[in-house]
Image (tube, helix red, strand yellow):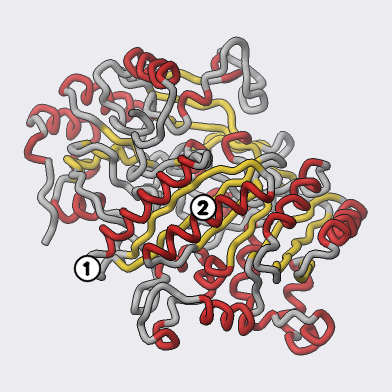
Amino acid sequence: MPKQTSYARLPTSAVEDWTRILGREFIQTDSEQLGAAETATFGTQQRIAAILRPGTLADVQACLRAANRYGTPVYPISSGKNWGYGSRVPPADGCVLLDLSRLNRIVDFSEELGFVTVEPGVTQRQLYEFLKQRNSRLWMDATGSSPECSLIGNAMERGFGHTPYGDHAAQVCGLQVVLADGEVIETGSASFAGSLAAAAHRWGVGPSLDGLFSQSNLGVVTRMTVWLMPEPEAFAAFFFRVEDPHGLPALIDSLRELRMREVLRSSIHIGNDYKVLGGLQQYPWNETNGQTPLGPETMAHSRKDLSFGYWNASGGLYGTPALVTEAKRMLRKALNGQRGKLKFLSPRTLLLAKRFAGPFRMLTGWDMRRTVELVEPVLGLMRGVPTEQTLGSSYWRKRGPASAHTDPDRDRCGLLWYAPVSAAEGAQVERLTSIATDTLLRSGFEPMISLTMLTPRNVYCVVSITYDRDVAGEDEKAMACYEELSARCMENGYYPYRLGIQGMGHVPRSDAYGGLLRRLKNAADPNRVIAPGRYED
């Protein structure tokens, strides 16, 4: 049965205005379309009143002016693939979706300065194909999410990737933003008419406004410049398998030292055994006789059979051949004495390993036949190639195989992400992962944990609560687990770097900080029509 929607509560004059602005084909009101937009990878109750699909900056301005006239809240989305955090569902009930996917132009590009200026509908796939068609020597930085995800959407959520440009919010400038009253502002050097440095210089003069529009509801970002990485002369990936169940702290401390000294320059990703197994296959229902969660004996068997460790680190080495060779030497030295196996891989050696799997195993001790399906897309991500492979892990607990065209919302995959931050100190990171592991196992879920050393000083942790929404009671059970995990992490000093709609308003702030945010919202959006409830108390 389709959900009952809030469309009937919209003023008729508002619908008429939006229809006049956009045309009938770009305003969606039927129950099937609204029901799909109201569906996330966990239980939601919010209803969407309509979906507006502007195609130009002027359309966005006019839609927001109409929203102000009628007091109707709008919730902007780019591609709407915010899986694990709410997908397309707004935090508040009765919003109209402002779907920006038709704004999909690549506005400007410079091979020499290494930048591209895009609209919110531009996806990872679109940019990758754009660069490939031009035989560009520039690499984008790709997230591990879908190739159809928006570049602007991810950067404005402070998402991350895999290369030295992995901190996405740190690699953008020149935002074009539509305020609630329809006024357009540009940030940084782009705020000066005729500026020749608009795509190259973030700050401009005076207070910087860029940060006000990331993880906020103060305006709608309709354009942004993204900096791209020059293709390095040499590239190799490293993989380290931790074979000591208590080896994570030493690994974190060793990698931090190499990051601090800029021996390692890129984001470093570390997944626990559950995370790696979820990337390779679905839940082993036959081996476990349908029992959940996956127990230690089964995990021990999987680690041995599939050749992965308790923790599994990967990262890229970039630079000249001499620099990459030296980085390998220093990495070997730093990890020497830790129980584990260090391997290096380049695109060329991967090709040889796939072609000559037997001899490669004899020479290196690495059975690539079992892990190539996981390693190959990771190697691509380190070189700016988006992949759909990682999305398959959202089908972990589903009884049937993943669809050919994966859609976790449509296929009722259960997925909740909680994303706390730790300082890059081994003992702190171990404490955080222990809290997550204990909470999820006691709640009946596998603790799929990924760690990203995004900078030399911090580690982002993403905990996946993965389940099957078709199993009665699992939505409620998963949300209770999420809430316990969130509370325990914050009680111990581990606060999130990013929130989904399930966590909005639950992160305590100081009175002064929260008060300033409210004053800014009241000034920029007095009628509170843009994304009410998004990152605000």
Q: Is residue 350 above or below residue 437?
A: below
Q: Is disc 2 surrounded by few (<14), some (14 to 19) or many (20+) residues within 10 Å?
A: many
Residue 20 image position (x, y, % from top left): 18, 31
For disc 1, the neighbor class at 10 Å (few under 14, some 14 to 19, many from 20) is few
Q: Which residue is mark 2?
A: 462
Indicate the amino acid at tag 1: Ala
The answer to whether residue 105 of the structure is visible from this angle is no
Q: Quadrant of residue 293?
A: bottom left
Q: Secondary structure at mark 2?
A: strand
* Left or right of 529 on screen, residue 183: right
- Residue 47: x and y, percent? 18, 44
Foreground pick, 415 / 447 = 447
Left or right of 480? Residue 9 is left
* Residue type highlighted by circle 2: Val
Q: Residue at x 78, y 55 (%)?
A: 317
Residue 284 seen in this snapshot: yes
In whole angstroms, how far apart are the C-alphas of marks 2 and 1? 26 Å
The picture places residue 295, in percent across and down from the top left corner, at 47, 76
Residue holding disc 1:
472
Image location (x, y in percent) of residue 246: 67, 63
Element marked by disc 1: loop
At horizontal 63% and vertical 69% (from top left) the residue drawn is: 310
Image-based side of 146 in relation to 112, left or right = left
Question: Which residue corresponds to the image point at 55% horizontal and 55% vertical from the top-left?
Answer: 433
